[in-house]
Image (spheres, helix red, strand yellow):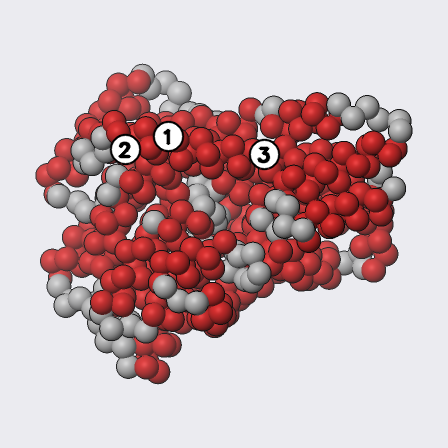
Amino acid sequence: MNSLLFGTFLAALTTGIPIAIAMCLGSLVYIWFSGSIPPLTVVHRMVGGVDSFPLLAVPFFILAGNLMNSAGITNRIYNFAIALVGWLKGGLGHVNVVGSVVFAGMSGTAVADAGGLGTIEIKAMKDHGYPVEFAVGITAASSTLGPIIPPSLPLVIYGVQANASIGKLFAAGFVPGVVMALFMMAMVGYYAHVRGYGADAVFSWARMGGASIELVAVAITAFVLFHLWGNQELGGLYKFGIPLAVVLAADRLLRFEAFMALLTPVILIGGMASGLFTPTEAAVAAVAWALFLGFAWYRTLSWRMLVRISMDTVETTATVLFIVASASIFGWVLTTTQVTEAIAQWVLSISSNPLVFLLLANGFLLVVGCFMETIAAITILVPVFMPIIAKLGIDPVHFGMVMVLNLMIGLLTPPVGMVLFILAKISKLSYEATVSAIMPWMIPLLATLALITYVPEIVLWFPRLLYP
């Protein structure tokens, strides 16, 4: 019967049927031939798979990312990054990374980063004389920051499947995201030295100072908001009204480039850490902030644009949740047939050392990422891995970050890496040339993966600080 389940699933995949439908077919064939389970179980389990309050965050985070992407905020982020690091050798390469770090705090997906900010970055780098392969490689690598630095759509799905704190998962992404960015910038510096790339912006104390002041202002605002929101005795005026008025006045007076955009992750993490709202409510807060920036502050959104963005969000959400629903019934069949328990026993028979298991898990997930969509991989594999990490004493927050980073690397690998297709279309490179351009940039990604796998404090330090 297990052979029938997997055989139907794999046969459907080889014929080009989408993975969500393939999972449904495999589950339905198994249930039909089992004779003891009503076929309507497929429907009930699929509905139950998406009947989850935390999953409400999915459409709102998608909508927030689409709003930010369409409100002209990507240009502000790009200009801010140029002011901050454009004067370094290989300047636009560094700008690419810093821009993705900022945009990651709003989009939550690698695809949105590659398709939104990547369009601006690749064109600018080509115009400044950089080889298109270099532009595509760094853009692909930096786009993986999207789901690592919160908010993160894959981490929401993982948290639901693993019954882990989404707030802690979000907090866990900050330090690994910074490490990834530093490794990428180091590689940009290496290429700049070897190939003789120069700076792309004239160093100016005024511009550099302005960008630095923005960062300092964000840090001060974060400190103040964390303190105010954590004080249960203060009223709404002191928690929201006065801070908002000060922030708006500072942005207008000092003419900041990306200050308001930089506040997005501050609001989300600060609100969740202080108990002001749940991760699901944080998604609604992100949408409200994006609407405020687009309609009231920058005035770059129109009602017609909002309708188009909403329809795009509905389409994307339907796709994601259908994958989750399909994987739910597939995962339920795996659990009822005790396949997950058998896999756990088999893995533990090889070694009960957590370090060895993490090595095996990394290798397996890197291969899975080459062939399977991220959300589907998470919803299928989390029920398989959870019994193992529980027995080995591995923190689910730590393992979640390792799993998501593995699958983000999978977005850059053939044959089904989504970012590959997006960047090939944007850059007008062939698919093969795009793959070749991205391969060297696996070095900083794999280095980060090794580091967070075997130094878990890199992942767990910040969540323990915020959620003692």
Amino acid type, mark 3: Phe
Q: Residue at x 60, y 38 (%)?
A: 323
Judge from the rendering whether residue 222 lies leftward or rightward of residue 37; answer left or right.
left
Q: Position of residue 443 (x, y in %)?
A: 50, 70
Which residue is rendered at x = 31% and y = 16% of the image?
A: 235
Q: Secondary structure at mark 1?
A: helix
Residue extending furthest toward the front:
15
> Residue at label 2?
305
Crowding at mark 3 (Cα within 10 Å: few <14, some 14-19, many 20+): some
Q: Which residue is mark 3?
A: 322
Q: Position of residue 136 (x, y in %)?
A: 38, 65
Indicate the amino acid at tag 1: Ser
Q: Position of residue 407 (x, y in %)?
A: 57, 53
Instruction: Tell me if residue 453 comes above or below residue 274 in the rendering.
Output: below
Q: CA distance from mark 1 to mark 2?
A: 8 Å
> Of label 3 and label 1, which has the lower sequence position?
1
Q: Nearer the viewer, residue 463 or 412?
A: 412
C-alpha separation, residue under disc 2 versus residue under disc 3: 26 Å
Instruction: Identify the residue shown where x is 13% and y is 43%.
Output: 255
Q: Quadrant of residue 179?
A: bottom left
Secondary structure at badge 3 equals: helix
Task: Determine whether, in the image, residue 268 is placed left or right of residue 244.
Answer: right
Quick one: label 1 or label 2, which is nearer the N terminus? Answer: 2
**x%, y% of residue 445?**
50, 63
The residue singled out by tag 1 in the image is: 310
